[in-house]
Structure formats: C-alpha cells, structure tokens
Image (cartoon, rainbow, N blue to C red):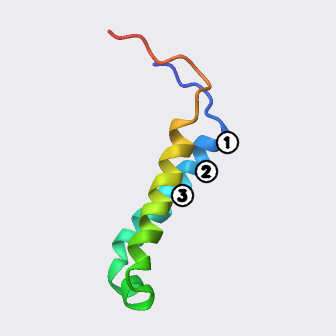
Amino acid sequence: MNTGKHSQNFWIGNGVLALAMLTLLFMGPISEALGIWAVVLWMVLAGVGMALVVSDKSEEPPSPD
C-alpha cells in the first residue's frame, strides 16, 4: 500500500470537516442560538472542508488491482 505524504491543505480540510461534524452533533443548541444561520454555518464548513480535501493533488491515484 502506498502511503504518500499529503499536503497541508488536506489536513486543514480534515480539521474543517471535523468541525462540520461537531456542528451537526450539536445542531440543536447551535440552532437555538443562531437560528437558520446554524445550517448555513454547517454548509459553509462542509463545503470549504471538501474543497480543501479535494484540492490535494500531491500524488497519482493508486492503480486498480
């Protein structure tokens, strides 16, 4: 198995996606405080996290078996 080194954007993206997951776990209290903006916050975090993870083009994809 190839274990290549990922770029810094990949790890930052994973961190942002972890924040998006925490936002979903605590959506009740967050939505009471922010209203509809809680969903907007979650969508922005998920979008930015996915964009950062997908932008990691540091290595070739593995060949199929």
- Using the numbered discs, state the Cα–Cα distance from disc 2 to disc 1 in whole angstroms: 6 Å
Q: Position of residue 46 (x, y in %)?
A: 45, 56
Q: Position of residue 61 (x, y in %)?
A: 48, 18
Mark 1 Cα within 10 Å, few/some/many (few <14, many 20+)?
few
Which residue lies most toward the right here? 8
Quadrant holding the C terminus:
top left
Q: Which mark is residue 16?
A: 3
Choose between 36 and 50: the one closer to the eye: 36
Amino acid of disc 3 = Val
Which residue lies most toward the bottom here? 33
Q: Which residue is mark 2?
A: 12
Amino acid of disc 2 = Ile
Whether residue 18 is visible to the viewer of this picture, yes or no, is no
Asked whether disc 2 touches disc 1, contact meaning CB atoms under 8 Å apart, the reply is yes
Q: Is residue 38 left or right of residue 12?
A: left
Q: Secondary structure at mark 2?
A: helix
Q: Secondary structure at mark 1?
A: helix
Residue at x-position 48% and y-position 47%: 50
Asked which quadrant contains residue 1, the reply is top left
Residue at x-position 38% and y-position 72%: 39
Asked whether disc 3 touches disc 1, contact meaning CB atoms under 8 Å apart, the reply is no
Q: Is residue 10 left or right of residue 23?
A: right
Up the image or down, 22 lies above or below 14; here it is: below
Amino acid of disc 1 = Gln
Q: Secondary structure at mark 3?
A: helix
- Using the numbered discs, state the Cα–Cα distance from disc 3 to disc 1 in whole angstroms: 12 Å
Q: Which residue is mark 1?
A: 8
